[in-house]
Image: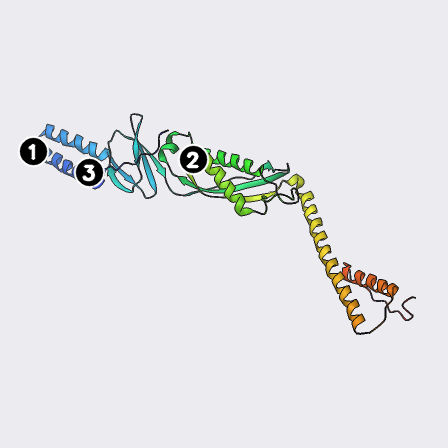
Amino acid sequence: MKTEKIIMPFNGYIALGLATACAIAAFVGIVHEQPIFVIGFMLLFVFIVKGLIIVSPNSSQVLLLFGKYVGSINKSGMFWINPFYWRRSLSLRAMNFESTPIKVNDKMGNPVLISVILVWRVQDTFKVSFEVNDYQQFVKVQTDSAVRKLAGSFPYDHFEDERATITLSTNFDDINHALEQEINERMHMAGIEVVEARIGHLAYAPEIAHSMLRRQQASAVVAARHKIVEGAVGMVDSALKLLSEKDIIELDEDKKATMVSNLMVVLCGDRETQPVVNTGTLYQ
C-alpha cells in the first residue's frame, strides 16, 4: 500500500523573477519587431506562470502527472511545479464533527440515544485522496459505526449490571478512550488522525426514559430512607444511654419499646409530627 510522499518543489520567487524577465524580453522583441523572439519568450512566460502555486499554512497540495502520484507539498509558501501536474488542495487543519444522536442498544439491550463529538485532521494526503472515495463522508459513517459498537459493549449504568466495572454513564474517561481507539483503528486506512473523541449526548430512548427515571427515583428514595433509619437508630440508642447514665428515669422493657417506637416515628416520618400531651401515666 502506497503512502504519502513529501516533495520540495522549486522556489516560486525565483520562478516569478524568471517569468518577469521573459515578459521584459518579449516586450523588447516587440519593440525591435522580432516576432519569433517574442513568441518564444511569451510561451516561456506562460509556461512558468502556469506552474506557480501558492500553499497556505496547514494546507497541502497533492500532485499527479497523467494519473501517476508524484508527491504532496505540505510546506506553505509560493513554489513552481510542472504545469502539467494535476493538483488537489487539502486542508490539514483540525476539524470538528458532531454526530446526530442515534438510537442503539446497550449491552443489556436497552435502547439509548448517543452522539459523539470528534476532532480529526488529515494525516496522510495520499490515503485521503486515493484510498477512500469521499473522506469526509467516510469519517461520518465510520464514526457512527464505532459508536454503535461501543454502546453495545457496555451497559448504560450499574442498575442493569451491578458487576460491570465500566458503564456508559459513569466511566467517561474510560469510555472516551475506548471510543477514540475504536475510531482511530477505522480511520487509519483513510489516512485520518483522531485528535479527540468523546460522548456528546447520552440518554435513554424516549420509550423507556420515563420508566428508567422512576426506577432511579425509587432507588434514590430507598437510599435516603436507609440513611434516615440508620441515623434514627443511632439517635435512639444515644438517648437511651443518656437517660440511663444520668438516672433521669427508670425504664422497663415495655417503656423502652414505647419510647423507641415513638422516637422512630418522629425521626423517620416524612411529615411533621403533632405532639400529644399525656396527663396520665405512660401506660394510659
Left or right? Give the position of 239 relative to 148: right
167 versus 64 height, above or below: below
Residue 199: tell me if it is visible: no
First reached walking from the N terminus: tag 3 or tag 1: 3
Q: Which residue is mark 3?
A: 15
Quadrant where the C terminus is found in the figure? bottom right
Residue 60 x, y percent position in the rendering: 33, 38
Which dot marks residue 230?
none
First reached walking from the N terminus: tag 2 or tag 1: 1
The quarter of the picture where residue 64 lies is top left
> How many other residues sit within 10 Å of disc 2, few (<14), some (14-19) or many (≥20)?
some
What's the distance in space between the residues labelled 2 and 3, CA to CA? 38 Å
Residue type beneath disc 2: His
What's the distance in space between the residues labelled 2 and 1, CA to CA? 62 Å
What's the distance in space between the residues labelled 3 and 1, CA to CA? 26 Å
Q: Which residue is mark 2?
A: 188
Q: Which residue is mark 1?
A: 32
Nearer the observer, 23 or 257: 257
List the single residue furthest toward the left.
Answer: 32
The quarter of the picture where residue 32 lies is top left
Quadrant where the N terminus is found in the figure? top left
> How many other residues sit within 10 Å of disc 3, few (<14), some (14-19) or many (≥20)?
many
- Disc 1 on helix, strand or loop? loop
Left or right? Give the position of 138 relative to 53: right
Left or right? Give the position of 271 relative to 212: right
